[in-house]
Image (spheres, rainbow, N blue to C red):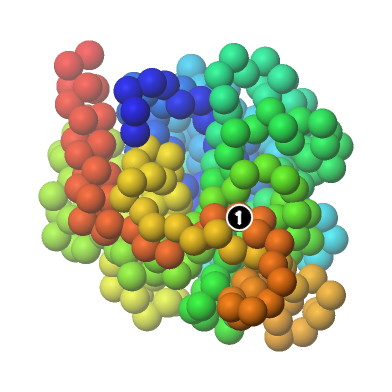
Amino acid sequence: MTNKKTSVWIDTDPGHDDAMAILLLAQNPLVEILGISTVFGNASLPKVTRNARYILDLANRNDIPLFAGAEQPLFRDQIYANIHGESGFDGVALIEATPVTVDEAQSAMITAIKNANAPLTILALGPLTNIAKLFTARPDLVKRVQRLIIMGGAIAVPGNKNRVAEFNVFCDPEAAEIVFNTIIPKTLIPLDPCTPVVLTDQNIASLPNGTVGTTLKRALASYVKNIDTFEGIHGALMYDPIAAYFLLNPSAFETQPMDVRVETTSKGLTYGMTIAERRTIAERTLNMDVVTKVDEKRFVLAFLEAIHNMDAQKRSM
Ligand code: RIB
Ligand code: CA
């Protein structure tokens, strides 16, 4: 990352990994978080919005504006995750979720994009419903977005929500197809490079004993247990923090330009599958850069250091 500030809007469905992505960016002085919009996904809209507020409180970053977005997919029925628990952020004490103003995020995102005085990146960590609605309503704004970084999809690996589909895309395949077809420069971080990267028990034990580290250890105890139960993987999956890390240090990643589409017509086994044209001779419309590799060691080190820095900053206040 150069030493100039990066402006970013985060669209998210916290979610333990979303929480870690927000913490990673919130503590970085070279990142200006213009705002956070929430979207249904890991839990209902009121719950993920409550969770986002909790995380901003934990990070002492209530200066970052927070807006509720979509409460349901564009067309399909709603599905939920299981690894984040009933609250969407199990393992910590949360206040009761209260009703939110659905879609208030739309006008906030439009204002932020129009008023951005530096090139703006959007980091999408949940279902793409808010982003699809935004650029359907205001296609004129696509040229004002420098890059859209998306955690989602699965290219050459199985899905994590069913045989073929990754959760964020499967939550709203039609929204993903709309976003994939915009001309915004896009970087996709699919399951392929993410699934092998987990925080180990040792990594988690090395988190600091300040408020952030202690809270994270409690939340991750629940997250790791659910991942063991539902995914048969041991460790804390780091999908969203990896996507956030791309913003901080793209040199730690390898990418490949691809033509990626979403299956939205079949409502059967392949519904929500992300399909890349990988034949060498076929005609392709390259619509995104796809991350194929991440430097796992650099990422894990950067994440652990960020949490230590955040607790050290809190202690010095
Ligand atoms: O498939 C992983 C994605 O779905 C992550 O963003 C996780 O938070 C869930 O939203
Ligand atoms: Ca997420």
Q: Measured from the top left, where is residue 287 in percent x and y? A: 66, 56
- Front residue of 31/93: it is 31
Instruction: State which quadrant residue 259 falls in.
Output: bottom right
- The quadrant of the rendering that contains the C terminus is top left
Q: Is residue 45 above or below residue 236?
A: above
- Graded by Cα atoms within 10 Å as few (under 14), some (14 to 19) or many (20 or more), the crowding at tag 1 reads many
Which residue is at 59% across, 78% downward? 280
Badge 1 marks a residue whose secondary structure is strand
Q: How many marks?
A: 1
| Residue under numbered circle 1 | 288
- Front residue of 230/251: it is 251
Q: Is residue 28 left or right of residue 309?
A: right
Which residue is at 37% across, 38% downward? 248
Q: Measured from the top left, where is residue 70 in percent x and y? A: 74, 44
- Front residue of 109/14: it is 109
Which residue is at 31% across, 50% downward? 252
Which residue is at 79% across, 71% downward? 264
Q: Measured from the top left, where is residue 290 in percent x and y? A: 52, 59
Q: Is residue 74 above or below residue 49?
A: below
Is the CB atom of the residue marked by disc 1 within 8 angstroms of ligand 1's nearest atom?
no
Instruction: State which quadrant residue 253 falls in.
Output: bottom left
Which amino acid type is shown beneath numbered disc 1?
Met
> Can the viewer see residue 43 in this picture?
no
